[in-house]
Image: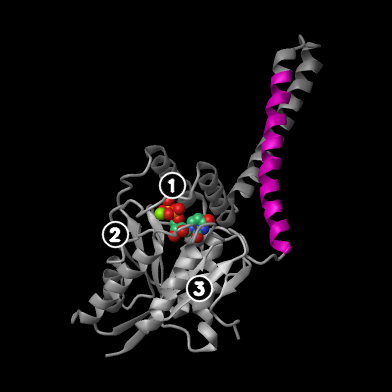
């Protein structure tokens, strides 16, 4: 029997009431796994909590859990940000910590990334590990098969987003895919090595490739508190995801411009010939103004789109860090 170490990476933003319950639930699953005779390997869990600039007692809760971890010989590491950098940044910090291995020691064999609010059922970890043992795959990702309990309009937009994403982007993202995933160390290293500062993990997980298996689960309500995603945040997330992984809008805009230019050249020639043969036409103010407005609008829209890409290049060239650490019980990476 091989013994494998598993890092549980948890992004937390204002999850004070959930941290302890989360830890207990995952620990219970860990105990279940060690009693389960169906496993080929034994698994040792350690935790990397990332406090994403919470304004409540999240960090205190994490520290309490870390103390409890000392008692039952479970490593509980944490990283705390200087402000709220967003879930993407929090996941990245956790993945980087897992990739380099805490305190310069040997990194864990596996990592699981999951939410702190118990919306990602810890029980599913059992299924994920079993699947990895059976298939020898590199990563097992979870997919939500129902969106029960979620506002209908949000589900509708989410579906539309995945449809457009998969049509126009170089990568395929499964509908209902969530950031709940088991990865082997090779994949963790690959994700940690992705250098972009504006991150879209669902896209990155798909982009790095690796042999992926899926497990499914039913939607569950968060244990306590509210979802941190406002309509505005979600819209921004969708646009980020799309722009980061698609260059087809730019290509489309180029082709569209070409067709319009060719069409108007032909139109101009036709008009000149008409004037030469039949003399002056009656002036058409309305149509002219319509055309000017139409193209004015199109140009502004297209400039806006190009601006999005240029804006991103600008942000990337600044090479700003994805997050800033304020507090941590992990020694600086060697
Ligand atoms: N989260 C985070 N930073 C943020 C927003 C969310 O680290 O700025 C964490 C949050 O604590 C939770 C996970 O990301 O563990 C998912 O967030 P939430 O439950 O609000 O999203 P939803 O489940 O509604 O998609
Ligand atoms: Mg949630």
Q: Residue at x 54, y 87 (%)?
A: 104
Circle 3 Cα neighbour tier, 10 Å, few/some/many (<14 / 14–19 / ≥20): many
Rendered view: 120 above or below 99: above
Mark 2 or mark 3, earlier in chain: 3
Residue 94 is at least partly visible in this image: yes
Q: How much space separates mark 2 and mark 3, taking CA atoms? A: 29 Å
Q: Quadrant of ligand 2?
A: bottom left
Q: Main secondary structure of the magenta part?
A: helix
Label 3 secondary element: strand
Q: Residue at x 53, y 64 (%)?
A: 90
Q: How much space separates mark 1 and mark 3, taking CA atoms? A: 37 Å
Q: Residue at x 30, y 45 (%)?
A: 148
* Mark 1 within 8 Å of ligand 1, using the beta carbon: no
Locate residue 22: give its quadrant.
bottom left
Q: Nearer the viewer, residue 201 or 114?
A: 114
The residue under label 2 is: 216
Circle 2 Cα neighbour tier, 10 Å, few/some/many (<14 / 14–19 / ≥20): some
Magenta-tinted stretch: 289-318
The residue under label 1 is: 163
Label 1 secondary element: helix
Which residue ends up furthest to the top in the rendered image? 282
The residue under label 3 is: 78
Q: How much space separates mark 2 and mark 1, taking CA atoms? A: 19 Å
Q: Give the foreground label among 1 and 3.
A: 3
Which residue ends up furthest to the left in the rendered image? 37
Circle 1 Cα neighbour tier, 10 Å, few/some/many (<14 / 14–19 / ≥20): some
Q: Is residue 137 left or right of residue 196?
A: left
Q: Residue 119 in the image: x percent, y percent?
A: 35, 57
Q: Residue 326 in the image: x percent, y percent?
A: 62, 70
């Amino acid at each position: 029997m091989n013994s494998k170490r598993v890092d549980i990476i948890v992004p937390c933003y204002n999850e004070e009431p959930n941290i302890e319950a989360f830890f207990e639930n995952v620990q219970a699953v860990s105990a279940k796994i060690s009693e389960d005779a169906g496993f080929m390997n034994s698994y040792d869990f350690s935790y990397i909590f990332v406090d994403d600039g919470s304004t409540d007692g999240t960090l205190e809760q994490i520290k309490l859990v870390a103390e409890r971890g000392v008692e039952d010989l479970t490593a509980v590491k944490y990283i705390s940000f200087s402000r709220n950098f967003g879930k993407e940044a929090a996941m990245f910090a956790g993945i980087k910590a897992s990739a380099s291995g805490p305190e310069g020691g040997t990194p864990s064999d596996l990592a699981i990334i999951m939410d702190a609010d118990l919306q990602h059922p810890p029980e599913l970890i059992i299924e994920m590990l079993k699947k990895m043992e059976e298939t020898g795959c590199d990563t097992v990702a979870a997919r939500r098969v129902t969106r029960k309990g979620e506002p209908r309009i949000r589900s509708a937009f989410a579906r539309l987003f995945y449809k457009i994403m998969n049509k126009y982007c170089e990568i395929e993202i499964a509908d209902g895919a969530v950031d709940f995933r088991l990865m082997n160390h090779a994949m963790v290293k690959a994700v940690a090595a992705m250098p972009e500062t504006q991150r879209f993990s669902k896209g990155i997980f798909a982009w790095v490739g690796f042999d992926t298996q899926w497990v499914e689960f039913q939607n569950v309500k968060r244990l306590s508190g509210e979802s941190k995603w406002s309509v505005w945040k979600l819209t921004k997330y969708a646009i980020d995801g799309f722009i980061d992984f698609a260059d087809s809008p730019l290509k489309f805009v180029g082709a569209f411009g070409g067709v319009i230019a060719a069409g108007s050249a032909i139109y101009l020639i036709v008009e000149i010939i008409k004037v030469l043969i039949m003399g002056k036409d009656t002036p058409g103010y309305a149509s002219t103004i319509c055309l000017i407005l139409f193209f004015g609008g199109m140009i502004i829209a297209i400039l806006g789109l190009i601006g999005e890409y240029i804006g991103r290049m600008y942000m990337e060239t600044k090479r700003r860090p994805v997050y800033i650490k304020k507090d941590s019980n992990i020694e600086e990476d060697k």
